[in-house]
Amino acid sequence: MRKFGLLGKKLSHSLSPLLHSIFFEEMGIEAEYKLYEVAEHEIDNFKNYMFENSIESVNITVPYKKAFLDKLDFISDEAKEIGAINLLYIKDNKFYGDNTDYYGFKQTLLTNQIEPSGKKIAIIGRGGASASVYKVLKDMGAEDIAFYFRKDKLSKIEFPEDMTGDIIINTTPVGMYPNIEDNIVDEQILKKFNIAIDLIYNPLETKFLEIARKNGLKTVNGMEMLIGQALKTDEILYDIVLSNQLREKIIKKIIKRVKEFYENNGN
């Protein structure tokens, strides 16, 4: 049985095992996908841990998306440009890095018919996820992009009072379960935009998106990006390309199961 998983610091909120199990189920594959919570002082030993435990691949989430950049044999061009990886895998005893967040966010824009070219865009946050978002936006023709982020862990993000734009994107974990009442952008700023995108998927509607929706903005959560990057991961690991028909079938099943999961777990 092939072994895969998700590497991060705190993973109790993760839906990744559910997503990949549905792919395995649909494809008739025997594989496991586990969560690997690792403390920061232990992260340098994780590659050896993968070898010792026959773990072929892990997706990577905060805060480790930049931890392996200079420790791999091969890194995809996208991951190099982004400066972050969210997929670490072993092939022929060599370590490879890729960034499937890129594909997930691009699919989100295409699915929701959001054209970034010619738009004024605000990206909140400056971590690995924001780098993927920026790369997608640039590749799709966007030029007017501004970042807003904390200068240090104790400070707050300072937004200019006259801030306006077309698309505002939250790439931070602010508002994620269980801190669902937290919001990173004041209503007075949000209402000056037309589209609000949040990379968070738990809850499906964060306070950020709720306020945006009530002010007439088009809102998009992080579920499509999560699914998109997961399926791209599976395509890479199994060296396949899913047909549009099969992809849609898997996506529908995932969305159904995720809603059931949230209903059963009360969040």
Image (spheres, helix red, strand yellow):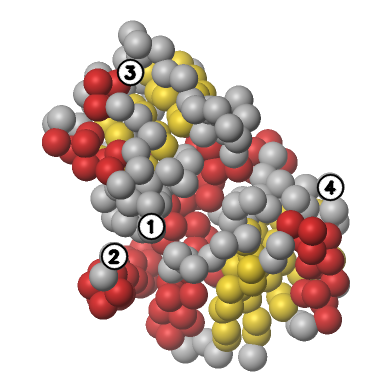
Residue to which mark 2 is pinned: 267
Residue 82, image x and y in percent? 64, 38
Q: Quadrant of residue 223?
A: bottom left
Callout 3 secondary element = loop
Residue to which mark 3 is pinned: 165
Q: Amino acid at mark 1?
A: Tyr
Callout 4 secondary element = loop
Q: Residues within 10 Å of mark 4 (few under 14, many from 20)?
A: few
For the residues labelled 4 and 3, the Cα–Cα distance comes to 36 Å
For the residues labelled 1 and 3, the Cα–Cα distance comes to 28 Å
Indicate which disc, 1 or 2, sits on the residue closer to the N terminus.
1
For the residues labelled 3 and 2, the Cα–Cα distance comes to 32 Å
Indicate which disc, 3 or 2, sits on the residue closer to the N terminus.
3
Residue to which mark 1 is pinned: 177
Residue 11, image x and y in percent? 54, 65
Q: Amino acid at mark 2?
A: Asn
Q: Residue furthest top?
A: 162
Q: Are marks 4 and 3 in contact (CB under 8 Å)?
A: no
Residue to which mark 4 is pinned: 70
Q: Which residue is at 26% across, 50% downward?
A: 205
